[in-house]
Amino acid sequence: MERLRCNTCGAYFTADLPDEVNADGEANQKYGYSARSIMGFPKNGMGSPFYRQGSLQDLLGVPESASAIFDQTEYF
């Protein structure tokens, strides 16, 4: 999360997360439920292999490995 620092006193301020983000899963988990469903849909709905999804994520600028996508789809 973004933190802002006051130039006068040097205190740091962190904004609260929106309610939609807090409702998407536990606070300490890396991936929310919506991210897991987006990772699982191409495999189960379209038959796209995990390595191809990982390559697509790299092209989009999100370095996500095929093994991480596989691990997250195991939660379903």
Image (cartoon, rainbow, N blue to C red):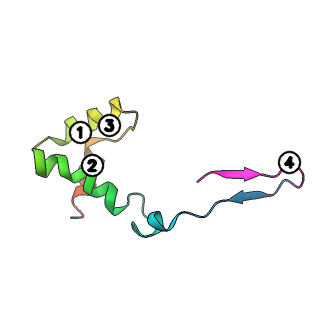
Residue 62 visible (yes or no): yes
Residue type beneath disc 4: Asn
Per the model, the C-alpha gap separating discs 2 and 1 is 8 Å
Residue type beneath disc 3: Gln
First in residue order: circle 2 vs circle 3: 3
Per the model, the C-alpha gap separating discs 4 and 3 is 38 Å
Residue type beneath disc 2: Ile
Q: Give the answer, above or below, for where 1 lies relative to 17.
A: above
Helix or strand or loop: what does disc 2 sit on?
Answer: helix
Residue type beneath disc 1: Gln
Residue 3 x/y as whole percent: 67, 52
Helix or strand or loop: what does disc 3 sit on?
Answer: helix
The C terminus appears in which quarter of the rendering? bottom left
Q: Which mark is residue 53?
A: 1
Residue matched to label 2: 69
Local packing at callout 3 (Cα closer than 10 Å; few below 14, some 14-19, many 20+) is some
Residue matched to label 4: 7
Per the model, the C-alpha gap separating discs 1 and 3 is 6 Å
First in residue order: circle 4 vs circle 3: 4
Q: Residue at x 46, y 63 (%)?
A: 21
Per the model, the C-alpha gap separating discs 2 and 3 is 10 Å
Query: Where are the magenta residues, as a range?
Result: 1-9
Residue matched to label 3: 57
Q: Residue at x 32, y 59 (%)?
A: 34
- Residue 2 included in the magenta stretch of the image: yes
Q: Quadrant of residue 33?
A: bottom left
Residue 8 x/y as whole percent: 90, 51
Helix or strand or loop: what does disc 1 sit on?
Answer: helix
Q: Which numbered mark, 2 or 4, is in the foreground of this view?
A: 4
Q: Quadrant of residue 26?
A: bottom left
Please identify the dominant SS of the magenta region.
Answer: loop
